[in-house]
Image (cartoon, helix red, strand yellow):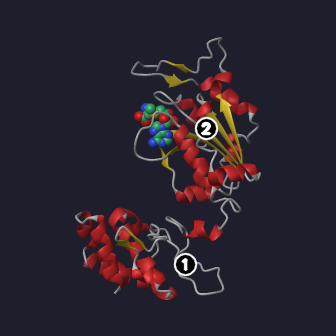
Amino acid sequence: MQFDILTIFPEFFRGPLDHGIVRRACEGGLIEIKVHDLRAYARDRHRTVDDRPFGGGEGMVLKPEPIFECIETLSVLPRAERIKNSAKQTVVVLSAQGQKFDQRLARNFAALERIVLICGRYEGVDERVSDFLADRELSIGDYVLSGGEIGAALIVDATTRLIPGAVGNEASTRQESFGAQVQESKTAGPDSTCGSGGLLDYPHYTRPAEFRGMTVPDVLVSGNHDQIRRWRRRTAMEKTLRNRPDLLESVPLSDEDRKLLAQLRDEDLKKDYDHVEPSDRQVARKEQTN
Ligand code: SAM
């Protein structure tokens, strides 16, 4: 997989992509990240990449010529070829006006061979880039950032960790928040894990079992895999109900999930949790397991 990032601040990428999974993926040859300085494609001696907006108004706009010329040197497929479903390349403009980038899209991207990311700055990018050069505009959330660089780094990270071989234990990427499958046990022995199936992940704890008087839920140290799995499913649903109830509308739920959800709604946990201290949440979670 090759990522090409077009930016007027190439030095931005020296830090964020030099750690952990992304770094290992680069070192292992699983991905290649090429950062292209748009100023190198500016024609004048001041290396101008922006200009005032037609029609007046605030700020500056990134000019189309350096972006078109940079992409033309990359030998990507023509746009008409790329937007066919089977094409393994895509050219993206980072924009607050774009379609929201999410885990589903990250999964699709992980199957591609080449992703070109165009980072805007100032008031944005000349619209002809979106209209005639790129395949899509992507936003990383409903807020306005100063530039597309953080979004580009985010897309590289979220995509890379879903490429087979990037994460040591691949099953873990299927089980975490927004994961596709509900349940997937690859182990021969008893399994206490529980895939999120599009919901949020369940809470995680590690040693020590007691820290400053705060204990981990008894069920997690019980050794009873079945109970642990049920507790995890319940707390994942509870967290989703509290923090992201919108997800519950769009994921397939089993009959058992639906019963659990009805129970949680009955207990009106969402309302309670908005008003309780984190320590009391732990007590509540403990009570649920008894
Ligand atoms: N005038 C634009 C608007 O209101 O939609 C905002 C431009 S913003 C200050 C400059 C650049 O930051 C954009 O061209 C885009 O590349 C990037 N950017 C800002 N917010 C973003 C977001 N939520 N997702 C992705 N990129 C974003």
Marks 1 and 2, the one that precedes in the sequence: 2
**In the orientation shown, which residue stands out farthest toward the front?**
212
Q: Can residue 88 be seen from the camera position used here?
A: no
Choose mark 1 or mark 2, whichever is in front.
Answer: 2
Task: Read off the residue under disc 2.
Answer: 13
Q: Quadrant of residue 144?
A: top left
Q: Amino acid at mark 2?
A: Phe
Task: Read off the residue under disc 1.
Answer: 183
**In the orientation shown, which residue stands out farthest toward the top?**
45
Describe residue 142's horizontal placement relative to residue 114 as left or right: left
User: Is the residue indicated by label 1 positioned so its CB lies within 8 Å of ligand 1?
Assistant: no
- Mark sitting on residue 289: none
Compared with 2, 284 (above or below) is below
Q: Amino acid at mark 1?
A: Gln
Q: Please tell me which residue is depicted at 45% across the width and 68% down the height of the picture.
A: 199
Q: Please tell me which residue is depicted at 58% across the width and 56% down the height of the picture.
A: 106
The image quadrant where one finds the C terminus is: bottom left
Q: Please tell me which residue is depicted at 25% across the width and 63% down the height of the picture.
A: 274
Closer to the camera, 167 or 81? 167
Describe residue 169's horizontal placement relative to residue 205 as left or right: right
The percent position of residue 60, horizontal first and vertical second, equals 47, 22
Compared with 165, 238 (above or below) is below
Query: Pointer 2: residues within 10 angstroms few (<14), some, or many (20+)?
Result: some
Describe residue 130's horizontal placement relative to residue 144 as left or right: right
Q: Can residue 171 be seen from the camera position used here?
A: yes
Q: Quadrant of residue 265?
A: bottom left
Describe residue 48's horizontal placement relative to residue 163 as left or right: left
Q: Please tell me which residue is depicted at 30% across the width and 70% down the height of the picture.
A: 281
Q: Quadrant of residue 256?
A: bottom left
Query: Pointer 1: residues within 10 angstroms few (<14), some, or many (20+)?
Result: few
Closer to the camera, 238 or 83? 238
The percent position of residue 123, horizontal first and vertical second, equals 45, 28
